Image: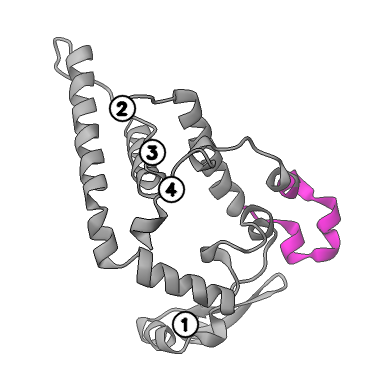
């Protein structure tokens, strides 16, 4: 399509008009002049899953988004802030290496080889890093007070969130067919899920070190 229409063109996705950039020159131009296309469409998934478009990554452009962007870029994602939290990433990698070694000692046989599910291993490590940065809590590994059921509940909730967020919903493209809820996606998004213990009020979230 870029060969036919050029490096910059628009395309209609249902009711939404999208701008397509297919060259780095155009992308560079829009990093400094992106006001006209910086907003995001209001989709069913972001309405139900993102607290009515309140999450920073899915909020439409406006005063609210600009304030969140300022807080995120100046207070949370600066090099100094990430550097202060680097010990969490280092410690989680060390903990995973220790766990692998203990597993190898426990299950080592004559061959000297063991089977490890890397997808689960890296998933658990990433969740530990995220939760320790946000809520000072880790779910997986050899730490005291680890609740396996609670941990898997949190992991499943996050997995369901991203899965539902990526689904195509008929209502987004053809509003007058939305009442049918073909496939039941909207019903699944509205479904009440159990509270995730890692995000409840009983956890002391470190606001002051970040802000």
Label 3 vs 2, first from the N-terminus:
3
Image coordinates for residue 186, horizontal then vertical, percent: 73, 50
Label 4 vs 3, first from the N-terminus:
3
Q: Which one is in front in this view, the residue at disc 1 or the one at disc 3?
A: 3
Residue 205 is labelled as 4
Q: CA distance from mark 2 to mark 1?
A: 56 Å
Q: Residue furthest front?
A: 208
Q: Which one is in front in this view, the residue at disc 2 or the one at disc 1?
A: 2
Question: SS of the residue at dot 4?
Answer: loop
Of residues 23 and 44, the one nearer the viewer is 44
What is the total number of numbered labels drawn onto the structure image?
4
Q: CA distance from mark 1 to mark 4?
A: 51 Å
Q: CA distance from mark 4 to mark 3?
A: 9 Å
Label 2 vs 1, first from the N-terminus:
1
Residue to which mark 3 is pinned? 137
Mark 1 and 3 residues: CB-CB less than 8 Å, in contact?
A: no
Q: CA distance from mark 4 to mark 2?
A: 19 Å
> Start and end of the magenta stretch?
167-186
Query: Looking at the picture, does residue 148 appear above or below residue 210?
Result: above
Residue to which mark 1 is pinned? 3
């Amino acid at each position: 399509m870029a060969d036919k229409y050029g490096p910059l063109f628009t395309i209609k996705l249902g009711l939404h008009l999208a701008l397509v950039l297919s060259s780095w020159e155009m992308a560079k131009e829009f990093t400094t002049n992106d006001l006209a296309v910086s907003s995001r469409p209001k989709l069913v998934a972001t309405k139900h899953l993102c607290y009515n478009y309140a999450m920073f990554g899915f909020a439409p452009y406006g005063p609210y988004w600009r304030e969140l962007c300022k807080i995120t870029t100046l207070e949370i994602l600066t090099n100094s802030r990430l550097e202060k939290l680097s010990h969490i990433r280092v410690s989680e990698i060390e903990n995973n290496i220790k766990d692998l070694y203990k597993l190898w000692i426990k299950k080592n046989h004559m061959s000297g080889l063991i089977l490890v599910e890397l997808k689960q291993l890296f998933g658990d490590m990433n969740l530990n890093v995220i939760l320790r940065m946000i809520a000072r809590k880790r779910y997986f590994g050899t730490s005291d007070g680890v609740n396996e059921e609670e941990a898997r509940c949190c992991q499943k909730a996050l997995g369901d969130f991203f899965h539902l967020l990526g689904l195509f919903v008929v209502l987004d493209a053809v509003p007058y067919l939305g009442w049918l809820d073909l496939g039941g996606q909207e019903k699944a998004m509205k479904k009440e899920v159990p509270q995730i213990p890692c995000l409840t009020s009983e956890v002391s979230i470190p606001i002051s070190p970040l802000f």
